[in-house]
């Protein structure tokens, strides 16, 4: 992630200040953080789908285990990128923002687990994990929208918060 941050900073002509920290109001942090997420989501989607089909075709035990390992790495990368972006976007309340993401993620996982056996029984593992892979892939357009419009939205939100405060003081959420 540091590499992506530095590459994005160089691309937009932004000077990184490791001593005092950076003013993110003028930096596209969304582009820096989401720069590599496309790889993570794509790999996890392919591995999830492949995992289902290795179970469906009853291949050697090593095949699904290897796919699970790779999927675990890529999902962990995705979580790290997203959580770092959330903390960057909400520096005034990072724990609250991170907790909200965790609750949402865990709730979605609970729903997925609660219906997993029904879907497995009805479709088999190949199509079940193809659906789960497709759900993962469906996040790519949403990530692209955040990548493209995130800085604009953040700037607008900061202006509204400054206006609501009425004192013209810089809003803590804008860094």
Image (spheres, grey):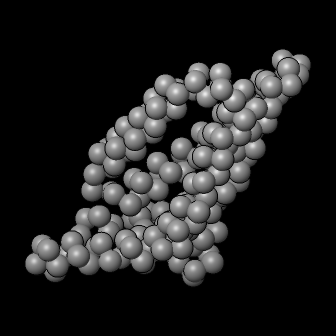
Across and down, in percent, residue 117 comes to 59, 21
Q: Is residue 56 above or below residue 103?
A: above
Across and down, in percent, residue 124 comes to 72, 26
Q: Is residue 99 above or below residue 115?
A: below
Relative depth, front residue between 149 and 11: 149
| Residue closest to the far front | 122
**Residue under the point 10% across and 78% down:** 166
| Residue closest to the far right | 60
Residue 7 in sight from this viewpoint: yes
Q: Is residue 148 above or below residue 115?
A: below
57 relative position to 31: left or right: right
Across and down, in percent, residue 15 comes to 52, 76
3 relative position to 18: left or right: right
Across and down, in percent, residue 152 comes to 42, 77
Q: Quadrant of residue 160?
A: bottom left
Q: Is residue 171 above or below residue 125?
A: below
Relative depth, front residue between 45 and 122: 122
Which quarter of the rendered picture does the C terminus lie within? bottom left
63 relative position to 127: left or right: right
**Residue under the point 14% across and 74% down:** 164
């Amino acid at each position: 992630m540091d590499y992506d941050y530095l590459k994005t900073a160089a691309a937009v002509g932004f000077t990184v200040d490791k001593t005092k920290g950076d003013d993110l109001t003028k930096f596209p942090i969304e582009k820096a953080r989401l720069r590599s997420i496309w790889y993570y989501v794509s790999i996890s989607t392919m591995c999830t789908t492949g995992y289902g089909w290795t179970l469906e075709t009853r291949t050697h035990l090593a095949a699904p285990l290897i796919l699970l390992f790779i999927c675990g790495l890529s999902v962990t990368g995705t979580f790290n990128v997203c959580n770092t972006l959330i903390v960057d976007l909400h520096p005034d309340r990072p724990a609250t923002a991170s907790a909200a993401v965790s609750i949402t993620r865990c709730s979605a996982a609970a729903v997925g687990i609660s219906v997993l056996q029904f879907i497995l029984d009805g479709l088999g593992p190949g199509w079940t994990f193809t659906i789960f892979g497709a759900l993962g892939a469906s996040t790519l357009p949403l990530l692209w929208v955040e990548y493209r419009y995130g800085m604009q939205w953040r700037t607008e939100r900061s202006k509204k918060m400054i206006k609501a405060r009425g004192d013209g003081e810089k809003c803590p959420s804008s860094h």
